[in-house]
């Protein structure tokens, strides 16, 4: 079942459920928007990590990320260096969360997302990979 259809089924089940005293189940909960889809950007080891960080942390890059429609949350992490000094499997990950698959696809098709991806691809001289995932837990 597609994520957006599953959400509708769950919302319908909550709306019609009742507590033991007959009160509607939804009256007992604070419903928080569900985040079900995540885009993970894997930045492979760049030739010049310092230059990548300058681009990634620039005001222009952060403003562009903020213009992508319907983002729920963004997390970024740097991969710890390996203790033996050998190359890490990646340099950085960037996780961008959306409410559902259709919203993610629309947002990722926006001109802002295209411009952000193009800038990251140029700055990440080691390459970048994208994963669009259904969050299970």
Image (cartoon, helix red, strand yellow):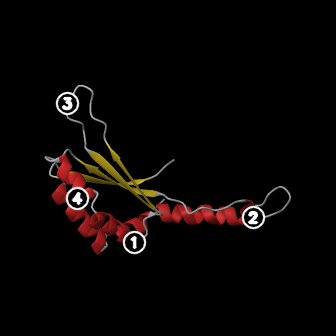
- Does label 4 or label 3 sit earlier along the sequence? 4
Camera-nearest label, 2 or 4: 4
Residue ID for mark 1: 69
Numbered circle sitting on residue 55: 4
Q: Residue furthest right?
A: 21
Name the residue at 81% across, 63% down: 23
Numbered circle sitting on residue 86: 3
* Whole-percent x, y for residue 118 in the image: 20, 64
Name the residue at 18% across, 56% down: 123
* Whole-percent x, y for residue 120 in the image: 22, 59
Work out whether 83 lies above or below 25.
Answer: above
Work out whether 76 lies above or below 63.
Answer: above
Q: Are marks 2 and 4 in contact (CB under 8 Å)?
A: no
Camera-nearest label, 1 or 4: 4
Spatial distance from mark 4 to mark 3, Cα to Cα? 25 Å
Within-10-Å neighbours for mark 2: few <14, some 14–19, many 20+: few
Camera-nearest label, 2 or 1: 1
Spatial distance from mark 1 to mark 3, Cα to Cα? 39 Å
Is 117 placed left or right of 102 in the picture?
A: left
- Does label 3 or label 2 sit earlier along the sequence? 2
**Which quarter of the picture shows residue 26?**
bottom right
Do we see residue 68 in this rendering? no
Numbered circle sitting on residue 27: 2
Is 21 placed left or right of 106 in the picture?
A: right
């Amino acid at each position: 079942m597609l994520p957006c259809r599953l959400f509708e089924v769950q919302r319908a089940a909550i709306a019609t459920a009742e507590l033991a005293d007959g009160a509607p189940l939804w009256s007992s909960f604070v419903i928080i928007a569900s985040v079900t889809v995540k885009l993970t950007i894997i930045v492979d080891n760049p030739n010049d990590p310092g230059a990548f960080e300058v681009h990634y942390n620039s005001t222009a890059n952060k403003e562009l990320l903020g213009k992508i429609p319907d983002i729920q949350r963004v997390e970024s992490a740097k991969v710890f260096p390996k203790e033996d000094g050998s190359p890490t499997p990646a340099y950085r990950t960037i996780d961008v969360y959306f409410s559902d698959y259709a919203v993610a696809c629309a947002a990722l098709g926006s001109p802002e997302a295209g411009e952000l991806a193009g800038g990251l691809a140029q700055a990440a001289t080691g390459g970048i990979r994208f994963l669009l995932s259904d969050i299970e837990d």
